[in-house]
């Protein structure tokens, strides 16, 4: 996804990222974490920082009218993450059903670009399948394509 993104701060392990979302009301610190789940699996989590700390709230609704730029910034971290963590699989699920639906919408919009570099699967009722447009997946699995 090659879209306008915010400037990132990255930790040395490429597991935690920070950036400021900007709107007319001010700046909001966003935190992104790739959380180890065991084996090759990592959970992709992000949200608004709680009082400028490393803790974050992934249920808050910021409404700062930059959703596309925020999601593009989150997606941009996958290139950095996979460069350092080859052979891993990232699980992405919204904190609510509506957020998972929002992520699916953006995955659908950029599907051709995504599939040129990544394998994208969806989980539906215990079955994992190649991502297809129009299906209400419970979560997504993303991995870097083997060269």
Image (cartoon, helix red, strand yellow):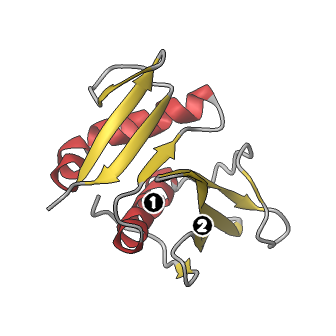
In the structure shown, which secondary structural element does the residue marked by tag 2 occupy?
strand
Residue 110 horizontal side relative to residue 83, left or right: left
The residue shown at (61%, 62%) is: 33
The residue shown at (51%, 59%) is: 70
- The answer to whether mark 1 and mark 2 are in CB contact below 8 A is yes
Q: CA distance from mark 1 to mark 2?
A: 8 Å
Image position, residue 41 (x, y; %): 50, 50
The residue shown at (20%, 51%) is: 113
Q: Quadrant of residue 48?
A: bottom right
Question: Residue 129 bears which disc, if any?
Answer: none
Nearest the eye: 118 or 26: 118
Q: Residues within 10 Å of mark 1 (few under 14, many from 20)?
A: some
Residue 5 horizontal side relative to residue 113, left or right: right
Image position, residue 144 (x, y; %): 29, 56
Label 2: which residue?
21
Q: Residues within 10 Å of mark 2 (few under 14, many from 20)?
A: many
Q: Quadrant of residue 22?
A: bottom right
Identity of the residue furthest to the front in this view: 39
Label 1: which residue?
69
Give the quarter of the figure containing the C terminus. bottom left
């Amino acid at each position: 996804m090659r879209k306008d993104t915010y400037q990132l701060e990255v930790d040395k392990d490429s597991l935690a990222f920070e950036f400021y979302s900007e709107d007319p009301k001010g700046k909001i610190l966003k935190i992104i974490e790739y959380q180890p789940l065991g084996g090759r699996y990592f959970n992709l989590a992000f949200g608004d920082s709680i009082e400028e700390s490393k803790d974050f709230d992934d249920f808050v609704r910021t409404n700062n009218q930059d959703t596309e730029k925020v999601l593009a910034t989150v997606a941009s971290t996958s290139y950095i993450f996979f460069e350092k963590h080859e052979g891993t699989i990232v699980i992405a699920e919204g904190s609510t059903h509506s957020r998972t639906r929002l992520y699916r919408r953006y995955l659908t919009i950029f599907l051709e670009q995504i599939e040129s570099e990544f394998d994208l699967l969806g989980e539906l009722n215990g079955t994992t399948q190649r991502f297809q447009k129009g299906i209400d997946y419970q979560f997504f699995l993303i991995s870097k394509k083997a060269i």
